Image: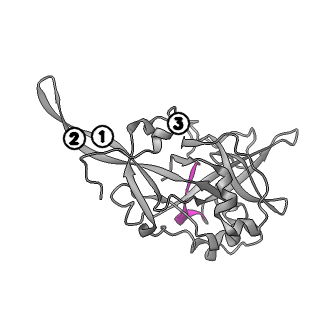
Amino acid sequence: MCGRYAIIDGKRIFTTFEKLKEMELRGQPFEMLPRYNAAPTDSLPAIAMRQKKVSVERMRWWLTPHTSVDGKPLTGPDNRPLSAFNAKSETLESSRLFGPYFQNARCLVPADAFYEWKKINVTKEVRGKRKDFVERQPVAFRMKDDRMFMFAGLFSVWRNEQGEEFPSFAIITTEPNELMKPIHNRMPVILNEEDFSEWLDRGNKSTGDLKKLLVPYPAEKMKAYPVAKLVSSSRNDGPECLKPITTEESFF
């Protein structure tokens, strides 16, 4: 799962990734940045092939199918929105929602970090008695050298009657690597730079080959550390969200 992430300086995209330079990446929609605690339904930068050009533009983090009648996310029997900010790599081809976009509407989602929560058993004194509780400690995951990276994503573009476009995206998840396993049973797919072209190519419909890219990122290239619990509320969105904190809990 990936429900929160950070992207600080979007312009670093143009200096970090040689492959994107070769593609003549267009657009700079970074006025919403920095975001230290981005959450689903937020408008965030994503990179996709649009009108035969690779461009970076603002997209809503919650995929809304282009076939939507009113431009709103799909809902279940209880009229609650179906979760569409993450897509499981193992079921992409068979998914009625995500399958069509996996075939020909894939994107890259730039990030500096993402967060996950670890459940911790704690004992506290309450009214003179010791009681056991389960707390959720947020943990930040980054590259060891703090380099930016790219999530594998899918995107959709819904258009209203006036022809206005409302693009949205979902982040693909896979099994956890060794760094993530003690924290959560899923992690976002992070693509290697050499795979960017293959992933963005909308003419490439070889889903069998594309699925081979959707694997856990090497744990040895990443780091993880606990951060303040203020990350648990998306209303908190400052640099303190990404700062390490000290804790007595052993994470790994």
The quarter in which the C terminus is drawn is bottom left
Q: Indicate the amino acid at tag 2.
A: Val
In the rendered image, residue 54, in percent from the top left (x then y), is placed at 78, 61
Q: Secondary structure at mark 1?
A: strand
Q: Residues within 10 Å of mark 1 (few under 14, many from 20)?
A: few
Ranked by sequence position, the earlier of labels 2 and 3 is: 2
Residue 74 is drawn in which quadrant?
A: top right
Marks 3,1: beta carbons within 8 A: no
User: What is the quadrant of residue 92 in the picture?
Assistant: bottom right
Q: Residue furthest right?
A: 162
x%, y% of residue 180?
39, 60
Secondary structure of the residue carrying numbered label 2: strand
Report, in whole angstroms, how far the alpha carbon at label 2 lies from the one at label 3. 27 Å
- At label 3, which amino acid type do we have? Asp
- At 31% across and 45% down in the image, what residue appears? 246
Q: Which residue is mark 1?
A: 135
Q: Are marks 1 and 2 in contact (CB under 8 Å)?
A: yes
Q: Is residue 213 above or below residue 233?
A: below
Q: Between disc 3 and disc 1, whose residue precedes? A: 1
- Residue flagged by tag 1: what amino acid is it? Glu
Q: Which residue is mark 3?
A: 237
Q: Is residue 5 above or below residue 231?
A: below
Query: 188 left or right of 29?
Result: left
Residue carrying label 2: 122
Magenta stretch, residue numbers = 85-92
Residue at 62% across / 75% down in the picture? 208
Q: Residue at x 11, y 24 (%)?
A: 128
